[in-house]
């Protein structure tokens, strides 16, 4: 069994910053790609940023230049540093990880979500 636990969401004013964290635990042999998605009310879940095990990154156009994804492989943790936040960044942010278990299976795991609200 694998768990992803997110933290770091909250209320921030426009132009502010937040750092989201997501720690994976459980039956883990290795972790391939990790990523952050978000879902705003009435909208579909969308990719925000992703990072491979080799630390190649991919960003949504809305995140480029403002958000930075990084990971600590020793701690099985992925981060999302968000700067210059806008009201349209308001959403529930979800962490996703492609986990290889000790028995060799690939487990697509999702976190429970953390709310980010950008408002004055």
Image (cartoon, rainbow, N blue to C red):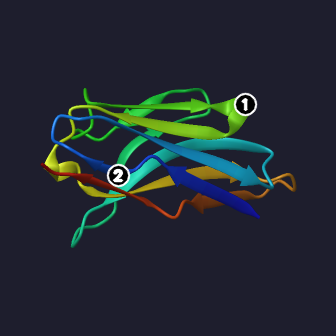
Taking the view exactly as shown, the residue that stands out farthest to the bottom is 42
* Mark 2 residue crowding within 10 angstroms, few (<14) / some (14–19) / many (20+): some
Task: Name the residue located 61 percent from the left edge and 56 percent from the top edge.
Answer: 4
Q: Position of residue 108 (x, y in %)?
A: 61, 59
Quadrant housing the N terminus: bottom right
Q: Secondary structure at mark 1?
A: helix
Task: Name the residue located 27 percent from the left edge and 31 percent from the top edge.
Answer: 83
Q: Secondary structure at mark 2?
A: strand
Q: Position of residue 63 (x, y in %)?
A: 27, 37
Instruction: Establish if 103 lies above or below 34.
Output: below
**Residue 92 image-quadrant placement:** bottom left
Instruction: Establish if 43 lies above or below 93.
Output: below
Q: Position of residue 70 (x, y in %)?
A: 50, 30
Task: Name the residue located 77 percent from the left edge and 58 percent from the top edge.
Answer: 105
Residue holding disc 2: 10
Q: Position of residue 37 (x, y in %)?
A: 39, 53
Relative to the observer, which residue lies in front, 82 or 109?
A: 82
Query: Which of pointers 2 and 1 lies earlier in the amino acid sequence?
Result: 2
Q: Is residue 86 left or right of residue 66?
A: left
* C-beta proximity under 8 Å, tags 2 and 1: no
Q: Which mark is residue 62?
A: none
Taking the view exactly as shown, the residue that stands out farthest to the right is 103
Task: Name the residue located 16 percent from the left edge and 51 percent from the top edge.
Answer: 119
Q: Nearer the viewer, mark 2 or mark 1?
A: 2
Instruction: Establish if 88 lies above or below 71.
Output: below
* Mark 1 residue crowding within 10 angstroms, few (<14) / some (14–19) / many (20+): few
**Residue 67 image-quadrant placement:** top left
Instruction: Establish if 42 lies above or below 86.
Output: below
Q: Is residue 54 left or right of residue 17?
A: right
- The mark tally for this picture is 2
Instruction: Tell me the CA gap for discs 2 and 1.
Output: 27 Å
Residue holding disc 1: 74
């Amino acid at each position: 069994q694998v768990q992803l636990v997110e933290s770091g969401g909250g209320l921030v004013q426009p132009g502010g910053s937040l750092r989201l964290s997501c720690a994976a635990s459980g039956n883990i042999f290795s972790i391939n790609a990790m990523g952050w998605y978000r879902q705003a009310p009435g909208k579909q879940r969308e990719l925000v940023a992703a990072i491979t095990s080799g630390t190649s990154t991919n960003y949504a156009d809305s995140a480029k230049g403002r958000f930075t994804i990084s990971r600590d492989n020793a701690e099985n943790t992925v981060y999302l540093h968000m700067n210059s936040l806008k009201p349209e960044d308001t959403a529930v942010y979800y962490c996703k990880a492609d986990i290889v278990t000790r028995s060799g299976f690939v487990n697509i795991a999702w976190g429970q979500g953390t709310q980010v609200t950008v408002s004055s």
